[in-house]
Amino acid sequence: MGPTRKPNVCSRLSRRALGCFSRDAGVVQRTNLGILRALVCQESTKFKNVWTTHSRSPIAYERGRIYFDNYRRCVSSVASEPRKLYEMPKCSKSEKIEDALLWECPVGDILPNSSDYKSSLIALTAHNWLLRVSATTGKILEKIYLAPYCKFRYLSWDTPQEVIAVKSAQNRGSAVARQAGIQHVLLYLAVFRVLPFSLVGILEINKKIFGNVTDATLSHGILIVMYSSGLVRLYSFQTIAEQFMQQKLDLGCACRWGGTTGTVGEAPFGIPCNIKITDMPPLLFEVSSLENAFQIGGHPWHYIITPNKKKQKGVFHICALKNNSLNENVLTVTASGRVVKKSFNLLDDDPEQETFKIVDYEDELDLLSVVAVTQIDAEGKAHLDFHCNEYGTLLKSIPLVESWDVTYSHEVYFDRDLVLHIEQKPNRVFSCYVYQMVCDTGEEEETINRSC
């Protein structure tokens, strides 16, 4: 059965104005997104490059906000032209923001302060401070000093919008120590609930217990430990915390640890490592995957791996966690792990003509977005295509005006009525190209090139 006829946008708007919906609160939002989807895909709608800027530091994008200068300068992309929201004061290299996550107010929770109901940026600085920064003003709302005994570098969500994991840089130890067989801590994971911040604990990953670990992370309450052979092992973080926590610690409270007294979360005392594994914890699951490519999720639980053979690179298997059986009903997935409901041959590329570089799924508009690049001599030209997620039908193609060098690093975001392309060129030159949905006036407008 083929796709049905597109509903009329005017009809949808009239029905919305008359309140012709059920009492389900989500119906209006879904109807609005359906209208936007129809507008995005109609033939007369264009996406125009409205803003281009360049930077010597990395550029990041998150939910309508573009971040420059290591997250210290924020520009809103939700306007006819991007505008600066805030710029934090200049700081030393030791105080720069290493990584950040956008936190948004959870629905239904009662929070202690009125400011807590607004979006915040959770930021990690180079000198081990964890900050909560207002996403609209750049004002620091909360700050926690992590620890003096290691260098924390990465932020990730354990449970999205609820629990964060702060990971340290890996400690390989000195060559002398390795030759002497001295066991050492490979890395640390600090776990916090947000908002307000409360400490779960700091866990050490020790070579004596886990062996030659290449990396470890926390996701949905599961400690995931990875090895150079491609082996991935899963453990319950809750079980580990209950079994090996030496002492429960509370932020802002006095603590005596190792002969030293201080306040938890304040400098110079910081937060002691209070979860030290002394015996191998119960193993939940293990699997082998190429380059440790592993994701877990879904209901019932499934995991995604790449078979541990070099010739299988780019191939993804979705397997049931219960019995390791391969799910034959799923044909392919995006790089972000979302299931794509389509026939693979509908998007089969031709390396000699054009190649697919980025495939993603816009869940609000239910569109599959594909970046295709055509290499003409030394210059590449790219276009972003929107496909119906249900049938794979090509609905819209948006040409990107800038040239595309396949040897550079690229990120492309499609967010409702916005397309954003971030490119990293040699010598740490970063470029940002912003496209916005506009009505076709039949006149060419000059692209705006400036720094905000």
Image: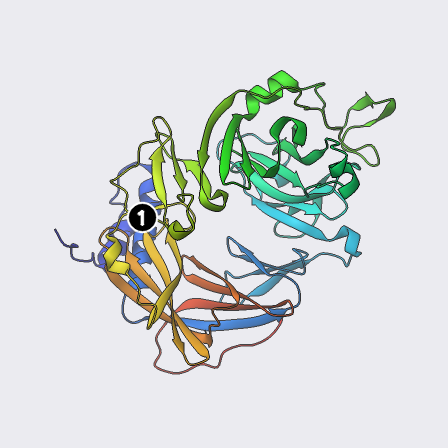
Numbered circles on residues, count: 1
The answer to whether any part of residue 355 appears in the image is yes
Question: Left of 64 or right of it: where is 38?
Answer: left
Name which residue lies at 41% across and 61% down.
417
Name which residue lies at 43% across and 75% down.
380
Q: Which image quadrant is residue 171 in? A: top right
Question: Left of 130 or right of it: where is 239?
Answer: left
Residue 332 is situated, as x and y percent measured from the top left of the image, at 31, 48
Name which residue lies at 62% across and 36% down.
212
Secondary structure at numbered mark 1: strand
Residue 210 is situated, as x and y percent measured from the top left of the image, at 61, 29
Image: 361 above or below 179? below
Residue farthest along the left direction in this orientation: 1
The answer to whether any part of residue 119 appears in the image is no
Residue farthest along the top direction in this orientation: 243
Image: 366 above or below 330? below
Label 1 Cα crowd, 10 Å radius (few <14 / some 14-19 / many 20+):
some
Image: 279 above or below 331? above
Q: Give the labeled residue for mark 1.
A: 332
Look at the image and tell me in which quarter the C terminus lies: bottom right
Residue 308 is situated, as x and y percent measured from the top left of the image, at 43, 43
Q: How is the image coloured?
A: rainbow
Question: Left of 241 or right of it: where is 15?
Answer: left
Q: Which amino acid does label 1 sit on?
A: Thr
Please state which of residues 373 and 165 is positioned toward the viewer in this rendering. 373
Q: Which image quadrant is residue 442 in? A: bottom left
Image: 120 above or below 356? above
Residue 49 is situated, as x and y percent measured from the top left of the image, at 46, 73
Please state which of residues 55 and 223 is positioned toward the viewer in this rendering. 223
Name which residue lies at 47% across and 24% down.
284
Q: Which image quadrant is residue 320 in? A: top left
